[in-house]
Image (cartoon, rainbow, N blue to C red):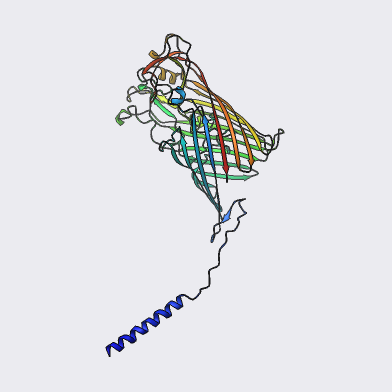
Amino acid sequence: MNIVKGLFLGSAAALLAVGGAQAADLPLKAKAVEYVKVCSIYGAGFYYIPGTDTCIKLGGYLRADITLNGSGAYNAPAWNGNAGQKNRLANDMVFRSRQDLNIDTRTATEYGVVRTYFDATFSWTSGGPIAGSDANTGVGVYYAFIQFAGFTFGKAVSQFDTPWTGYPGNNTSFLIGGYDDVTGINQVSYTAEFGNGVSASISLEDPSSYLQSGLYNTSSNTTATFPAGVYGANSYAGVSVPDIVGKVRVDQAWGLFQVSAAAHQVRASYYNTALETSGHPSDTWGYAVQGALSIKNLPTGPGDSINITATYSNGATRYVLGGVSPNSFAIYGNNSVPGTYQSIAFGGAADGVFAGTNNLNGTGIEKTSAWGVRGAFNHNWNPYWSTSVFGSYTSIDYNGTATNLICANVLASYGAGSTCNPDFRIAQVGTVTRWTPVKNLTFSGEVMYTYLDQGSSGTVTLANPTNGTKPATALYELKDQGVWSGNLRVQRNF
């Protein structure tokens, strides 16, 4: 009886299993496919993310270029390091390959458009390492911000800057003489649009990455340690107050006019950087102002333009030097004074200088002034060929007290009849020609001349700079220097 019962239950279970399998195999009604739809509200290239009312656009570029006779990628002049020393460790060519990817999303709301934007780069550089990476590879986050109801939160172009940032017409990232924030800066800002292209912005921006030049304690600047272009220990403290930036802009069919201003806190660490009881100089405030003008629809041809900026700073040197240029410059060359090893032109940029080892002998901060002009004329020969001519002039000026602080401990390094003057000027001029055989594919060649005009004269004994190949100490002729650099590039935008 038990055997029969077992067979019956087993058969029933098998029938249920088969029936279940057959039921599972019955066709179900397929869910409707959501096709990607074009989103024309925000311009070409936007599509709706399926199942949402958010539009997205993917873009970027792939770029390959080579810098000739420079100190780094993107036509960095040979104005410091091994390239400035002209030694056998310098690379006569620096290659870089870069992929840029960006993601732009926008959603219409009752408060206006909510926008997010992300832009990242992936680079391989040979012959010139990227800061913060290994010797060749580099990953950079240029922009990552949210915009909502007039506010911008995150890493975006500074409100101080112009739409062309550091590129009025050049390929090089090292045309100084004005603000340069092409890689973005962390900020919280608000922009009000008044119509007819008129707008105004106010912003709080993080100065720690790009906007702090040197703040030198000249007490450590001695004849034994006097290097080219550095005037003591860099003693910037941590950020206490963000930079306060304001801008008014008129952007219309004829061109653009803009006035920007920024307040920048100059805050030193300690007189003795290793001892907080040594005290510190009182905090002070620097500032920068900029005027910008762009003129379009020139009689020279369709699409031609002139872009120009003029900038002045006091205690905020980076607003004139840009964010990527070095703080110190040193270019070596041939000598003509008997007994000298070589000639040199050098200069160091600082937001300010002070001196002392404690509160009893310490001084206040003497702020540095700087000004610069930068611009370009851009001409289209035809739809396939275009040329830009660009240039800049930059001036770094230390007041009398600051000059005495810098020179006090190093006068013995200067020869008889020589002059110690830390002021310097840098003039740059260049041109680039571009060929675009098909849409979004451009080949370009650029050449630039950079001239360093220093305030010091005569002769000076200098210590071997860090990682340099010069003698431990040597006598140099103080002589203005100029260098040529060039860049070849091919870029595909998408």
Left or right for 44, reference 148: right
Left or right for 473, reference 29: left
- Foreground residue, 244 or 122? 122
The quarter holding residue 229 reads top left
Q: Residue furthest right?
A: 299
- Foreground residue, 130 or 65? 65
Q: Identify the image quadrant of the N terminus.
A: bottom left
Residue 188 % position (x, y): 49, 44
Q: Answer yes or no: is residue 159 visible.
A: no
- Foreground residue, 135 or 81? 135
Q: Answer yes or no: is residue 16 visible.
A: yes
* Picture layout, residue 196 above or below residue 453: below
Left or right for 384, reference 272: right
The quarter holding residue 271 reads top left
Residue 231 % position (x, y): 40, 23
Q: Residue furthest bottom?
A: 1
* Figure disc tally: 0
* Picture layout, residue 99 above or below residue 317: below
- Foreground residue, 306 or 8? 8
Residue 287 % position (x, y): 49, 31
Residue 489 % position (x, y): 56, 35
